[in-house]
Amino acid sequence: MAHAAPAARRGGTPDVFSERTHATARWAVPVALGLVYGYWAAANTRYGGPITGWNVLFGFVTTIVFIALYMGLQALAPRLPREVHAVLWGAFWAIAVGFLYSLSGRGHGVLASAVLGVAIGVAVFCTLFYRYYTHEDAAGHRIR
């Protein structure tokens, strides 16, 4: 019994979302992550106590800084080589997680926050480096 040969694919995987969806996601994802991050940071600084005005202000400032850094990195990093691209995202998430961990309890020292941040940063770097490395041609150009 004969089987048909699979048809050659053109252009890789299909893009199921429209340009408008991608444009919306470029700002909606950082805003959503920033809101969650800011709330989490504000909740960590309360230590289970009442919500205060300074606590709310800290949460909003943390949210704005997170969104600004995320969107700046999102605009800058794709123009860089894959190694630097992965290092920047790894450093961003290492700092973000280390900062949250340092706020989470009075018993956590700087060393514990740094170790956790570095562990997260290395994991993010390895994951993203592998992804960028496997989605580029031999000359280092992204395959779209």
Image (spheres, rainbow, N blue to C red):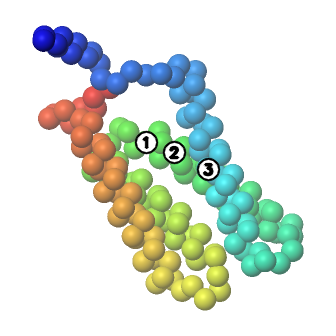
Residue type at mark 3 is Leu
Q: Nearer the viewer, residue 144 or 141?
A: 144
Q: Nearer the viewer, residue 128 or 96?
A: 128
The reply, left or right, for residue 65 in relation to residue 119 is right
Near mark 2 (Cα within 10 A), the count class, few <14, some 14-19 or many ≥20, is few
Q: Residue at x 45, y 70 (%)?
A: 117
> Disc number at residue 8?
none
Q: What element does badge 1 sit on?
A: helix
Residue type at mark 1 is Leu
Q: What element does badge 2 sit on?
A: helix
Mark 3 or mark 1: name the one nearer the start of the chain: 3
The reply, left or right, for residue 115 in relation to residue 43 is left
The reply, left or right, for residue 106 in relation to residue 120 is right
Q: Quadrant of the C terminus?
A: top left
Identify the residue under disc 3.
33
Q: Quadrant of the N terminus?
A: top left
Q: Give the CA separation, mark 3 to mark 1.
A: 19 Å
Near mark 1 (Cα within 10 A), the count class, few <14, some 14-19 or many ≥20, is few
Q: Which residue appears farthest toward the bottom when viewing the image?
A: 107
Location of residue 55 with respect to 34 vertically, above or below: below
Q: What element does badge 3 sit on?
A: helix
Identify the residue under disc 2.
72
**Labels 1 & 2 near each other (Cβ < 8 A):** yes
Name which quarter of the figure residue 136 lies in.
Answer: top left
Mark 2 or mark 3: name the one nearer the start of the chain: 3
Q: Position of residue 27 (x, y in %)?
A: 60, 36
The reply, left or right, for residue 23 in relation to residue 81 is right
Residue type at mark 2 is Gly
Q: Position of residue 50 (x, y in %)?
A: 87, 74
Identify the residue under disc 1.
76
Q: Position of residue 18 (x, y in %)?
A: 53, 19
